[in-house]
Image (cartoon, grey):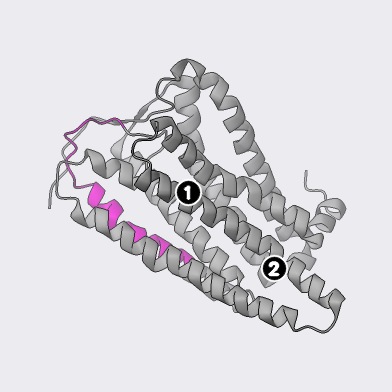
Amino acid sequence: MWLNTTVSPFLLTGFPGMEKAHHWISIPLLVVYVSIILGNGTLLLLIKDDHSLHEPMYYFLAMLAATDLGVTLTTMPTVLGVLWLNHREIGHQVCFSQAYFIHTLSIVESGVLLAMAYDRFIVMKIGIGVLTRAGLSIMPIIIRLHWFPYCHSHVLSHAFCLHQDVIKLACADITFNRLYPVVVVFAMVLLDFLIIFFSYILILKTVMGIASGEERAKALNTCVSHICCILVFYVTVVGLTFIHRFGKHAPHVVHITMSYIYFLFPPFMNPVIYSIKTKQIQSGIVTHPIW
C-alpha cells in the first residue's frame, strides 16, 4: 500500500474559459441552491409538524428530502467559493470527505426510491438498511484515496470532489478504484431500478384491476409522484453516464453542465413534484404555514 506524503492541495475548477462570467453564472446556481434548501426544508418541517403525515410514505419522503439537502449542502460551499471568490484550493482530507458524502448520498437516494415502492414495510428497518448499505459500499474506495501519491496535475475537473476525478491524479495502481465503483453501480443502482420497474408493473396491474374508476384514479395519482421522482433521478444518472462514456470529444463545459444537472435537478424537482401531485402536502402547506 502506498503512503500519501503529498502536501499540495487539489485545485477545483469552475467553468474553464468562462472565468470572467463566473459571478453571473453563480446567480442562477444560487437561486437553485436556495430553492432546494427552502423546498426540501419545508417538506421536512411539514412532515415533522403535521401528524396526519406521520405515515410510512411521508417518512420516506422526509428521507428523500434530507438526502437532497445533504447533497446540496455538501457541494454548495465549494461551488460558490470557486465562482464568487475564486477560492480553488481544497485539502486532501476535506476533498475525500466531500467525495464520500456525495457518492454515499447518491446511493442513499437510489435506495430510498426503492424503499418508497415498499412503504408498507417497517420504515425504520429499511431506512437503516439503506444508510448502512450506502455508507459501507463507498468506504473502501475513499479509504484508498488517503494512501495514493498524487504526482500528476492537482487540478480537478469540477468545483467539487468526485472519486472518479481524484483517481485520475493518482500515481499508483488504481485498478480496484476503477472497477469497484462499476460493480457498485451495477449491483445497487441498476438493481434498484430493475426492482422498482418490476414492482410498479405489479402495482399497475393491481390498480387496473380495481373496479371503481374513482378508486383507480386515486391509486394511480399516488403512484405518479413517485414515478416522476424515479424518472428525474435515473434519467439524469443515465445522461451523466452517457456523457462520460461516449462524450469524450464533447466540450468540457458540457461535462461540467451535465454534472450540475445531475446534482441539482432531482433535489430541485422532488419537492415541486410532491407539492403538485400530493393533496396531503398541498393542504399541509396551506393549513400549517412553516415560515
**Nearer to the camera, 242 or 75:** 242
Position above or below: 285 against 123: above
Viewer-nearest of labels 1 and 2?
A: 1
Give me the residue at 43% from left, 31% from top.
253
Label disc, if present, on residue 239 of the rendered structure: 1
**Nearer to the camera, 155 or 215:** 215
> Which is the main secondary structure of the residues drawn in magenta?
helix
Q: Secondary structure at mark 1?
A: helix
Q: Is residue 142 visible?
A: yes
Q: Position of residue 151 (x, y in %)?
A: 16, 34
Drawn side of residue 177 relative to residue 151, left or right: right
Q: Position of residue 105 (x, y in %)?
A: 47, 54
Q: Position of residue 261 (x, y in %)?
A: 53, 42
Drawn side of residue 224 relative to residue 90, left or right: right
Q: Amino acid at mark 2?
A: Cys
Q: Position of residue 210 (x, y in %)?
A: 78, 83
Please report whichever mark, 1 or 2, sits nearer to the chain's N-terminal start: 2
Position above or below: 95 against 201: above
- Is 136 one of the magenta-colored residues? yes
Magenta-highlighted residues: 130-155
- Is 187 one of the magenta-colored residues? no
Distance from label 1 to label 2 (Cα)?
24 Å
State the residue position of label 2.
Answer: 223
Q: Amino acid at mark 1?
A: Gly
Position above or below: 266 against 108: above
Give me the residue at 28% from left, 55% from top.
141
Local crowd size for mark 2, using a 10 Å CA cut-off: few (<14), some (14–19), many (≥20) = some
Position above or below: 232 against 56: above
**Mark 1 vs 2: CB contact within 8 A:** no
